[in-house]
Image: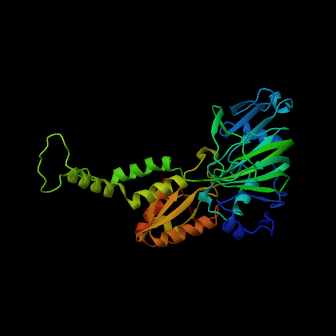
Amino acid sequence: MTTQLFSSRFSWQRFFEEYWQRKPLFIKNAIDLSQISLNKDKLIQLACEEDIESRIVKHKVDSSSWQVEHGPFDVDDTFWQQENSPWTLLVQSIEILDDDFSQLLKQIPIPRWRIDDIMVSYASDGGGVGPHIDQYDVFLIQGSGKRHWRVGDKSQQLKEIFVDDALKQVSSFEATIDVITEPGDLLYIPPNVAHHGTAIDSCMTFSVGFRAPNLQELLPHYTENLLASLEKSARYTDAQGVPFNDVLHVDESSFAKFATDFQSILWDALALKEAFLAQVTQQRNDFLFEDEELDSPVNPTTISELNLCEAMIGKHDRIASLRHENQMLIGINGEVFSSSMTFYNWLTKLYNTPETWVPISLDDDADKTLLWSLYESELVQIQTF
C-alpha cells in the first residue's frame, strides 16, 4: 500500500483552477517526508558517480562572485566540510536513483511526460543559486533545515545576466511571497517568476521541475518529419496567364501563388504531432537506468510466439499519445509509433502496472508486428510463460 504523502488539506482541484501557471503559492506542511531517507552524505556519494548529472555552485560573499563546477566529484575532497563560504550541491534525476522520490512523483496528478525530473540540492549556511527565473513550473519542497525564500510575480520584467558561464541570475525584484520554509513546506513557482532561496544554517530542498516543450528544439523534429513526407517533385510554378513584362521583377500574383503553396506545405498535422511526442517523451538521462535482467530469460524468436508471452515496461519509461484521424500515435522514450485503438488500450494496461508482467492478448497481425518492433527496439520487455 502506498503511503499518502501530500496532506489531505492540499486541494489539487483548487490548485489547478487558481494557481497552476498563474501565480505562486506557499503551502505550510503540505507533504509528509517521513518516508524519504536521503541525506547529505548519500547525496554527495551520488554526485561522485560518473553518469549522474551534478554541479556545485559556490558564492564568495565578500566579492559577490559566483562559480559553477560540474561533477563527478571526489567523495574524499575536504571541500565537503567547508563552512567559510556558501556553497550548494545540486543532483538531477533523483527519482531514478532513489525509489522514495519515484513514489513522490506518483502522487502528483500531472502526466509523467509533463514532469522533467526531481533535483535535490544541499546548501551550506547562506548557500543558494541566487535570484533567478525558470521557464517552466517548479515545486520546491523543503526537505530538511530551513530556507529563506523571496518570490516575485509574473508582472515584473527582469533582466537576466550571466554571473558565470553556466549560471544566469536576475536583477533585484519585489517579493510578493517572503517566507522561511521548514521540512514539508511547499512553494509552487510558475514559469518566468523570479525566486531566490537562501539556506539558513544548512538545508536540503527537493525541486520538482516540469517539462515545457521548447519550440526552438521542437522545430527541427517537425521539419525533419516534414521533409521526409515531402514529395521531391514539389516545385515552384507560375501563376497562370501572367506574362513576363519585366525581366527583373517577379510578378506579385506569381509570388502570391508560391506563398500559398509554401504555406500549405509547411502545415502537416501528423508531422507536428510526431515531433511533439518525440520531444515530450525523450529521456533526460538514458544512461541512468537499464531494464533489469531477467533471472532466466526465455525470449521469443518469432512474432508467432507472442500470444504465448507476457510483456513489461519500466517504471521510468516516458509514454504519451495523441489521436490522429482513426489511429493513435504513441511516443515512447523519444520514439513515435502509429497504433490501433486495441493496441493502445493494451499498452495502457502495461503503463498502469510498470515492472509487472502482463499477458499479451493481441489478435491483429498489425498489432503484433508493432509490438515486435517495440521489443526489437528494447522499448518493451517480453518473455515466454
Q: How many marks?
A: 0
Q: Tell me: 246 left or right of 37.
A: left
Percent position (x, y) of residue 338?
Answer: 43, 63
Q: Nearer the viewer, residue 128 or 79?
A: 128
Q: Is residue 78 visible?
A: yes
Residue at the spot x=76%, y=32% of the render? 58
Specify whether 6 is left or right of 325: right
Q: Quadrant of residue 311?
A: bottom right
Residue 302 visible in rendering: no
Report whether 338 appears left or right of 100.
left
Q: Is residue 37 above or below residue 54?
A: below
Q: Nearer the viewer, residue 182 or 263?
A: 263
Which quarter of the picture shows residue 45? top right
Q: Position of residue 347 (x, y in %)?
A: 54, 67
Instruction: Identify the residue at image location x=76%, y=53%.
Output: 176
Q: Quadrant of the C terminus?
A: bottom right
- Left or right of 187? Residue 275 is left
| On screen, residue 274 above or below 145 | below
Q: Picture coordinates of residue 301 (x, y %)?
A: 47, 58
Q: Which residue is at 67% across, 66% downward?
A: 16
**Whole-percent x and y of residue 281?**
55, 55
Residue drawn at point x = 11 percent, y = 50 percent: 243
Indicate how the structure is coloured in the image.
Answer: rainbow
Quarter of the image with the N terminus is bottom right
- In the picture shown, does residue 313 fall above or below 246? below
Along the line of sight, which residue is nearer the eye, 100 or 9? 9
Q: Nearer the viewer, residue 305 or 340?
A: 340
Looking at this view, name the residue that lies furthest to the top: 63
